Amino acid sequence: MSDAAAVAVGVLLGGIGSTQTAVCNMDFYDTRDDELIVNYNKKVSGGLGSDAQDLINVLMR
């Protein structure tokens, strides 16, 4: 949701919602036998003032 919508929800309901969301889903397979080696799934949410670069930095740590 936008920052303005998050502020409005915060005023009306007493809590601030997330304004940004990023999802990373990665699967690494061994191509010789099609066996799953690594599975990485992560979802992060940002609040007021967060931007895409902040969320990318969190995902890549």
Image (tube, rainbow, N blue to C red):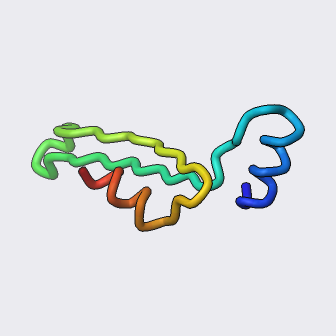
Name the residue located 38 percent from the left edge and 60 percent from the top edge: 56
Quadrant of the rendering where the N terminus is positioned? bottom right
- Residue nearest the viewer, comparing 23 with 36: 23
Name the residue located 59 percent from the left edge and 55 percent from the top edge: 20
Question: Residue 49, position in %: x, y?
Answer: 57, 60
Q: State how many labels appear.
A: 0
Name the residue located 78 percent from the left edge and 60 percent from the top edge: 4
Name the residue located 29 percent from the left edge and 46 percent from the top edge: 27
- Residue nearest the viewer, comparing 45 with 38: 45
Q: Is residue 16 left or right of residue 34?
A: right
Looking at the rendering, which quadrant does residue 37 occupy? Answer: top left
Furthest residue in direction right, as rendered = 12
Q: Is residue 5 left or right of residue 27?
A: right
Question: Residue 59, position in %: x, y?
Answer: 34, 51
Furthest residue in direction left, as rendered = 32
Question: Residue 53, position in %: x, y?
Answer: 42, 67
Looking at the rendering, which quadrant does residue 33 occupy? Answer: top left
Question: Residue 28, position in %: x, y?
Answer: 22, 48
Furthest residue in direction top, as rendered = 14
Looking at the rendering, which quadrant does residue 2 occupy? Answer: bottom right
